[in-house]
Image (spheres, coloured by chain):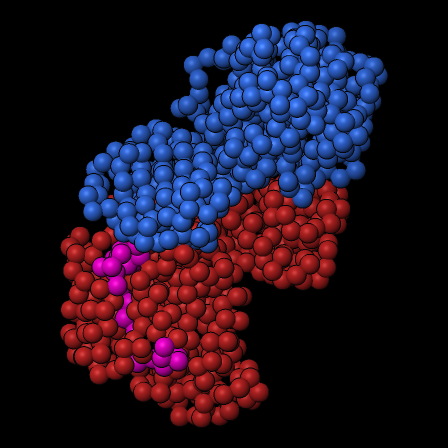
Chain colours: A blue, B red
Amino acid sequence: MKLTPSPFAPRSFPALPDVKGLRAAAGSRGFYARRGIERDDVFLFVFDEGTTCAGVYTVSNTASADVRWCREALSAGGGKARALVAHSGNSNAFTGPKGVEKNEATLKALTQTLGVPKSACFLAATGVIGEPLADPNFVGAFLPGLAGRLGPPDWEACARAFMTTDTFPKASGRTVDLAGVPTAFAGIAKGSGMIMPNMATMLSYVFTDAAIAPALLQDLLADITRVTFNAITVDGDTSTSDTLMVFATGASGAPPIETRGDARFAGFAAALHATCLDLALQVVKDGEGASKFVTVRVEGAVSELSAKTVACHIANSPLIKTAMAAGDANWGRVVMAVGKSLEPIVMDELAIWFDDVQVAKGGARAPDYDEAAASAVFARPEFTIRVHLGVDAHAATVWTCDLTHGYVDINGAYRT
Amino acid sequence: MKLTPSPFAPRSFPALPDVKGLRAAAGSRGFYARRGIERDDVFLFVFDEGTTCAGVYTVSNTASADVRWCREALSAGGGKARALVAHSGNSNAFTGPKGVEKNEATLKALTQTLGVPKSACFLAATGVIGEPLADPNFVGAFLPGLAGRLGPPDWEACARAFMTTDTFPKASGRTVDLAGVPTAFAGIAKGSGMIMPNMATMLSYVFTDAAIAPALLQDLLADITRVTFNAITVDGDTSTSDTLMVFATGASGAPPIETRGDARFAGFAAALHATCLDLALQVVKDGEGASKFVTVRVEGAVSELSAKTVACHIANSPLIKTAMAAGDANWGRVVMAVGKSLEPIVMDELAIWFDDVQVAKGGARAPDYDEAAASAVFARPEFTIRVHLGVDAHAATVWTCDLTHGYVDINGAYRT
């Protein structure tokens, strides 16, 4: 089916900085061409020696073969990266021994073509789950050709190559000054459905030419994931392929950041956080069928985790998501979602705001409740649902989109 | 908005048996009349002295004032019932002190009109959450009039009086022989959205003229709820008002069933189970916008709870529910839902069937997979998704419906 572009699609692809220490190429293995669609469906990144990396992956018990390989490589190689290959058209999840064969064939092509260690090669796949693989070499066969065309990344081509139900390519970049050294951050992401917190999301890669110790990078990435990719939800469904990786080439020329005490660490962390947050919010803004972008902020909770649990119950409720779509400020459903979360609350202190309009106060409708004002907020394309639980001082934020006819259409037709 | 009747609506209201020991009346307090709709919106049941009862209620932390009263009355009165009042139009949830005032006014009218103890009076309300109550006596004021019209129940009138987004009134009844005594069971239920396991569902009442000790009835009801009302889900949302109560008038004339060892207990339990299951499945079949009725059976789990958790992840996944609606046999999404449940599985043993068509086997697509056969199952109005997790021998069943454009429409328009 032809997808309607998200109303939040940016006018143009953002300008990304030049990240030193890497080369890339995107191409077509013909997956979409067979259906008459001209587009790329695979990309290859090659990193200079010395590149470190970190990754977070889906917590699913039916993780794809690619995710299982990435975990193994990250552990075996100690966070050293030389190559990354991602392709769309098949998720390589629930593909049995053939899925592992495909990875072995791809890794063989990478090590032979590039002369790099196997454990420094990372793989990703996205598309239909469980679709059998006729030829295990269907990615490997294209790698020598791709490797022959390596050069400065065409970021937009790469971001487009791994799209599935995405309606726009997602990217974010910035250059920051770390102790006098200009350091580039560039990230790309794909994802639109099967998106839910408590995981790394779909597929997202961030590249920087900073140098940083892999254990420190892994630690920082886990922190950042919690408040970016693990704080978004489109439909509450968790993919079998979710992957977020960061590659630090060290080609900026500065010495490596080894500890959190390094004067440059805060600047590095802020730039990585900004890049991940921008990418995560773009994933929500391209949520399948999304017409509203909604921030859910829960305060006054017993802990950050409790606040996030309540926020997810609100953000994932089909009743609230359909009310968002219709612009119906049905705040009673927010009360319902808070209640079903089973998290600690003081009901007589419960308060709810839609942007700056308070709709509930002291466990009942706000005395000066104004239906027109509340409805005006729900009519906006972007707004915030804020809830105070009245228990303690902890808070969390989750970002989501609405549930529209578009979601029903897209997900009834995805395979056809 | 005008609701399209569910395709599973029965041709006619079922014949219910005469339950001795109770009288009822339904009427209008004018809630719908103000919008030009002629229908009842309140009912009253009055029970003979000696009637015992049991109840299960929502686990929500924002339970309605009516639910909180029922819990208190059940505990204070020791399972004795004399009156039941339920009304539609306002859920009396998140209504602050006014909600409690409404209950007190209703209870005062009941005790004064009927001369029964307060703790033997049970209340229920359903409708919009958080709508303030202008006049706390808006139910109580109608009770003397209703009490003047008490008689043998018009079951259909009562079942219609507490409907909200329901498209058909729900009832189930049977007469069974308990040691030579014909014993009647009659039940009514309402519910269509905000339906999800791990609770009693919406509002449902079962009446019997058997005599049974209240503690035993409570115990049995908890068992039966687990595999009936707590095993259905429409949208994963848990209401603030969910209530299931059983009233046993004892008017059949037989001596009370006091223990599980009583020869009549199995027959009583079977009749109550059959009534509750029938009502619960009718709630799913009238799920908001439902076009498919789907049984999710999970086997081979480490425990019944684990099987049920996996079944709920499948039944609540928006991606699977939209695929059901479209008749797209996207079995990879079932793999996804099993994986995200985080319950123990042996992935290489995972198997999936759609009715009798095996689609997955040994952790991959079934070797003899037949897309046409799988799609033919998903095209049926009723079918079963069966999953074997390959771990142990425990199983559970959950019933659900699909997610259609109708659900999006109904829940965007509910308050208007």
Foreground: A206 or B279? A206
Relative depth, front residue between A357 and A239: A357
Please state the horizontal and vertical placement of residue A158, each as a whole percent of the image: 61, 16
- B252, above or below B70, in the image: below
| Residue B99 on the magenta segment | yes
Residue B390 located left or right of residue B399: right
Viewed as shown, does residue B127 lie left or right of B343?
left
Q: The magenta stretch spans which residues?
A: B76-100
Q: Residue at x 43, y 14 (%)?
A: A11
Tell me residue B137's x, y (percent).
17, 65
Q: Against B414, is A162 above or below?
A: above
Instruction: Give yes or no for residue A384 being in the magenta stretch.
Output: no
A145 or A48, which lies in front? A48
Q: Position of residue A290 (x, y in %)?
A: 42, 31
Q: Residue at x 62, y 51 (%)?
A: B354
Residue B323 appears in the figure: no
Quarter-wise, where is residue B409 in the image?
top left
For image coordinates 21% across by 81% down, the residue present is B114
Horizontal side of B208 relative to B154 (left or right) equals: right
Quadrant for residue A318, please give it: top left
- Answer above or below: position of B105 versus B185: above
